[in-house]
Amino acid sequence: MVLNKFREWLEAPAAEVGDRGGKLNVLRGAVARVTTPLLPDDYLHLANPLWSARELRGRIVEVQKETADSATLVIKPGWGFDFKYRPGQYIGIGILIDGRWNWRSYSLTCPPDWTGEGGKRLISIAVKAMPEGKLSSHLVNGVAAGTIVRLAAPQGGFVLPEPPPAKVLFLTAGSGITPVMSMLRTMDRRDGVTDVVHVHSAPTDADVMFGAELRDLHDRHPSFVSHLQLTDSHGLFSLDSLDELYPDWRERETWACGPAGMLDAIEQHWKSAGVADKLHIERFEVERSAVGEGGTVTFGTTGRTLTVDGATSLLEAGESVGVQLPFGCRMGICQTCVVTLSAGHARDLRNGDERQPGDKVQTCISAAAGDCTLDI
């Protein structure tokens, strides 16, 4: 009894930096008692910012230009990152700009357990600068190697199975190629490139991300076809042409990622052909077909409030006043950002559905419909 109480007392200062129980937590607690009021984490930060047990962190080690408006960021993750992710998944990345943390989700473009020079385990994402995207423009044109970023764990269901299907079709456009690039690199690394057709659309040859690598894969693997559709000179890729170009397309397990209009057309085409179960889609953008009225948003337990317009998501509103809201994909898919609406009304930006007090709302795709309060 006395020993148990002593152990609980010893562990208490470190209860938030690791799972309770185990010798490691006892040691953390003992060190914390010595270093109180600070925790060991506070000292570890001084030695190496990546040695944090409180949050996932990473250091940008290289920024590689892909096209005039896109770049690959190579990142060395710190403690706790799961390198066993599945090709096609995405991560959240947070970076400090003008004193405020900005978060977005980007697809991993590297294979799992990827190692760079010197055997260091690294990850990579590719970012396309968007005119209205403050963070994406900063990542492509402003961020420097050595910058420390925050990371959110890999997630997402748009993934390549292991082993990959015997016949595969990838349909991508623009930055929609990024999750597929992780899949292709994984197949190449594992020497498992099956019968794969990849149709990728971009305005011009200069706009094709990973263009040289696609050509190299095409040349090295007889079972891989890289079909580039340059839309400025040849127009949009016609789904009706699949019957002529790749007549076995109905037999192929298909992954598609790109602009919303393209994905809508693909969904309809596969549904009409009766093969919708073979289609996997990843959407990068929220289709905002509705707006709320705007109003004053109150973040319950924090006491913070903000008046916003009807197009600003509740997640963006919270982050702008420093409220740490849960989030994942930021596209209304993963349900990580769900919180309770304790008062007032909110509106789903995708379809205009109004949420009542007591309802659960996805903050990344909901906006204030008048004054409202979130239970967080």
Image (spheres, rainbow, N blue to C red):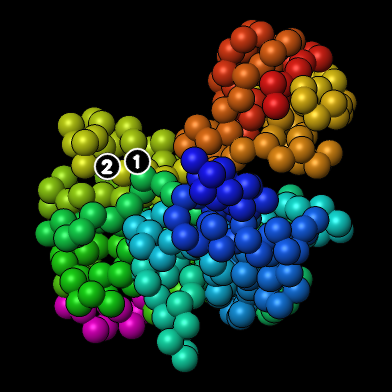
Q: Position of residue 4 (x, y in %)?
A: 51, 45
Residue on which disc 2 sits: 279
* Image mark for residue 298: none
Seen from the viewer's position, the closer of residues 265 and 172 is 172
Q: Which residues are magenta?
A: 214-222
Q: Mainly helix, strand or loop, the magenta region?
A: helix
Q: Position of residue 190 (x, y in %)?
A: 23, 75
For residue 362, side relative to residue 309 (left or right)? left
Residue 233 appears anywhere in the view: no
For residue 44, side relative to residue 338 (left or right)? right
Q: Quadrant of residue 292?
A: top right
Tag 2 secondary structure: strand
Q: Residue at coordinates 45% horizontally, 66% vertically from top-left?
A: 109
- Amino acid type at image mark 1: Ile
Give the spatial CA distance, label 2 vs label 1: 9 Å
Seen from the viewer's position, the closer of residues 63 and 259 is 63
| Residue 167 against residue 366 in the figure, above or below | below
User: How dense is the environment of label 2, judged by Cα within 10 Å: few (below 14), some, or many (20 and up)?
Assistant: some
Q: Quadrant of the C terminus?
A: top right
For residue 233, side relative to residue 28 (left or right)? left
Residue 195 appears anywhere in the view: yes
Residue on which disc 1 sits: 266
| Residue 351 against residue 44 in the figure, above or below | above
